Image (spheres, rainbow, N blue to C red):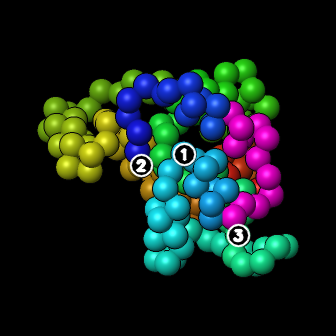
Amino acid sequence: MITSPLTDKQRWLIRHLFLHGRSEYSVTEAAKALGIKRFVIESGIETGQIDTVEGKRSGNRLPWRAVASLALHQWREQAIFDALGKDAERVLPPLLRLETLTVRVPAYMVRMLVWRAQEDGLTLDEEVRSRLHDEATSVRLIYPEIDEALPGFREAHFFPER
């Protein structure tokens, strides 16, 4: 994950992908759209971490959702929102927008989260988001009615699935 401030090129890549994305991409097109090397995508396809579809043209292609998912793993959510600016409201689910959460918990829990984040090479925000995402997945399995109780929950949880 890119943790340094975005370059102008990265901002442009994010805006182009989310505002002008196509339905599918070749491996080369996806790599260019993300500013990464082809082998990164090819490796993900080989290990089954990246989904492909039979393309309208020859060979396997990556659907937009797969490329957008890679973008969400490559750049911090805040960076994506910053790059999109006011357009974020138009192209991202409302419940995906970032909100500040302030909680008071015992010091050992904070230190554990900080340690886990460091071990995983994440910021504390990313570590907490990852754990809350896992919790959201569990809650949906135990309480399927959450989708009805919290309109937009499913859309945000599964974004970029369309």
* Residues under numbered marks 3 and 1 in contact, where contact means CB atoms less than 8 Å apart: no
The disc labelled 1 sits on which kind of residue?
Answer: Gly
Magenta region, residue range: 15-26
The disc labelled 2 sits on which kind of residue?
Answer: Ser
Query: What distance separates the C-alpha of mark 3 from that of mark 1?
Result: 17 Å
Q: Residue at x 63, y 60 (%)?
A: 28
Q: Secondary structure at mark 1?
A: loop
Residue pointed to by mark 1: 35
Horizontally, residue 150 falls left or right of residue 32, namely right
74 or 58, nearer to the observer: 58
In this rendering, the label closer to the viewer, 3 or 2: 3
Q: Residue at x 79, y 52 (%)?
A: 22
4 or 9, nearer to the observer: 9
Residue pointed to by mark 2: 130
Going from N to C along the chain, the mark reached first, 3 or 1, is 1
Q: Taking the image as drawn, is residue 136 in sight?
A: no
Residue 92: x, y in percent?
71, 38
Residue 59: x, y in percent?
72, 78
The disc labelled 3 sits on which kind of residue?
Answer: Arg
Position of the C terminus by quadrant: bottom right
Task: Mark 2: give few (<14), some (14-19) or many (20+) Cα within 10 Å.
Answer: some
Residue pointed to by mark 3: 61
